Image (cartoon, coloured by chain):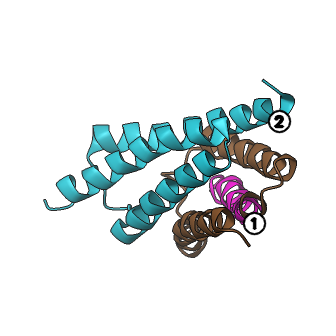
Chain colours: A brown, B cyan
Amino acid sequence: MDYIELIGFLAAILTTAAFLPQVYKTWKTKDVSSLSLPMLLIFFVGIIAWLTYGFLKNSPSMIFANSITVVSSFLLLFFKIKYGKK
Amino acid sequence: MDYIELIGFLAAILTTAAFLPQVYKTWKTKDVSSLSLPMLLIFFVGIIAWLTYGFLKNSPSMIFANSITVVSSFLLLFFKIKYGKK
């Protein structure tokens, strides 16, 4: 692996790790009041676009990071729709 | 601009746009209680790494997106440190 991908993977690990506590917190508390549905939808579509871009640019770090984040953001969207109804 | 960069810019606009309401909300309400300082720090360092990666990969969309997000995440970090003391 070249040093460019090392920086990419460092970035991927850091930004992905920063996102996970939010998913965990929302799952535990079921508090979705401060999460905005349009924001979550826009973000989810954006991550799918980044993942596509990562494949087209042959970027292992982008594919790695966005594969995890697409799941995280889907979960937040799912929690918002599920718990937001109450 | 080729179609790969078009997808990249679409991704950049979507994920950046999803992030801005959080910055605005925090600025208006000064409520930083639900923001975690370690998470903000890790995310900020991660975005700097993504920006570096974008330059090294010659990716205009990554440079564009992360230049905006580095400012947004710095502002959240600044608000957390400033308003978190109260």
Image coords of residue B31 (percent x, y): 29, 51
Image coords of residue B21 (percent x, y): 47, 37
Give the amino acid type for the residue marked by disc 2 in the picture.
Ile
Q: Is B79 left, or right, of A52 in this rendering?
A: left
Q: Residues within 10 Å of mark 2 (few under 14, many from 20)?
A: some
State whether residue A83 appears in this view. yes
Q: Is A2 left, or right, of A19 in this rendering?
A: right
Identity of the residue drawn at 48% across and 51% down: A34
The question of residue A6 being in magenta is answered with no
Q: Residues within 10 Å of mark 1 (few under 14, many from 20)?
A: some
Image coords of residue B7 (percent x, y): 79, 35
**Nearest the eye: B42 or B30:** B42
Q: Are marks 1 and 2 on the same chain?
A: no
Disc 2, SS: helix
State whether residue B31 appears in this view. no
Q: Residue furthest front?
A: A2
The label on residue A64 is 1
Chain for disc number 1: A
Image quarter where the N terminus of chain B lies is: top right
The label on residue B4 is 2
